[in-house]
Amino acid sequence: MFEDILHPALSDFVQYWAAWNIVKSGGNPYDIPTMLSMQNSLGRLGDYPLMMYNPPWLLTLLSPILSFDFSYSVAIFLAFNVLLIILQAKILSSAYLEKLDQKKLPIVLLLMLTFPPLLVALYLGQVSIILSLACIAVYWGLTKHHYPITGVSLSILTIKPQLFFLLFLLILWWSVQNKNYKILIVASLFLAGLLCFLLLQSTTLLFQWVDFVRSETLMKYASGTFPGFLSFVIFPGSHSLGLLYGITFLPSLLVSVGFLLYCIIKQPSINWETMYPSILCISIFTAPYGWFFDFTALILVYVLLIFDLIGGKRRARLIFGISLLVSIMCVVLIILGVRDYHYYFIVPLLYFLIFQYRNWEARKGLADSYQRYRSNGLIKRYEQYLIF
């Protein structure tokens, strides 16, 4: 729901601050009455608190920010997220834009602000911007063969593992296929470090989290992914826990099995620049649950389309124009009062289709260039070495 946007200081960020301060006092941040009491003391109204479903090592990452008074923590987190947005644009721009185009970084930042999930995440004080940076860092690390950065960033994505399950499978498959386990080792070591710090705070926190997420509470929310659409539109008002779990997890299970079978049978060579964004879109679309602000992770796809536009790539104006229409559609729906997240489930699918069209146009343009060079006699003896 979007009502909390009117009260950003007491919206989603309150769950993280309250959870960390409950942990410091020796309490259970996954206990509903405890969280309700803490949030009410901060001025949040209601009979049910905003619960933190994330694994507790998120608190380890955010602890430097959460250690201040609430008002200071809110301001610091807002500034931190703004810096992360700039950093995302800077990382991708430095790696994928020509040196002469580096002066166009302000244009990239301006166009990034036309991506509604990013703005909603920023306004609500959500951790989605941290995850979008981690997605970009994983992509950068894979394409540049910088595996330590990839491993650390991959471990950060476990903050919301349900969103990136297919990325985990893809990287696991690549690691086994290439017998290169550097990414998995670094990710495991970094995650182990987070867990060790967590255990110093509380030895029962992990078990408290597991007990909490096993409850049926999570299945009752109007999730913004395709399974959420199935659960709350095709089967409205269902109170069967078995049915809800089945509908929620079936799409991701089928996609995972299909992907693994494809890898085993086809043994594909992986082109990270095209496969990673595509898998990211599918993973979020079929995730068991997620919200509109979680689509912030798709900013990677959006920025790549911006780069095509700046670089004057084939049909770049048309392709970015289509993606901009998706943004406009989301804004219009919000203005019209469409506040249930599950009506936005189609957004990741639309960006997947847009990105596939972009790749198709790129391949077509490459093939056309090849034919022109060949007809002009520029490709003869080296022709057998060219693969498209």
Image (cartoon, grey):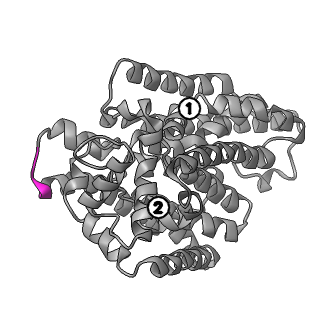
Q: Residue at x 28, y 44 (%)?
A: 228
Give the image quarter of residue 260.
Answer: bottom left
Q: Is residue 254 left or right of residue 101?
A: left
The residue that appears at 49% across and 35% down in the rendered structure is 120
Viewer-closest of 153 and 279: 153
Q: From the image, give the main secondary structure of the stretch colored magenta.
A: loop
The answer to whether 367 appears left or right of 215 in the picture is right
Q: Which residue is at 69% across, 56% downward?
A: 140
- Mark 2 — residue? 159
Q: CA distance from mark 2 to mark 1?
A: 22 Å
Is 135 magenta? The answer is no
Q: Position of residue 125 (x, y in %)?
A: 50, 44
Secondary element at image label 1: loop
* Residue 218: numbered disc: none
Sequence-first disc among 2 and 1:
1
Nearer to the camera, 133 or 306: 133
Q: Nearer the viewer, residue 302 or 311?
A: 302
Q: Amino acid at mark 2?
A: Ile
Q: Measured from the top left, where is residue 224 in percent x and y? A: 35, 41
In the picture, measured across the screen, residue 262 lies left or right of residue 383, that is left
| Residue 6, picture quadrant | top left
Q: Is residue 116 above or below residue 329?
A: below
Q: Which residue is mark 1?
A: 115
Q: Are marks 2 and 1 in contact (CB under 8 Å)?
A: no
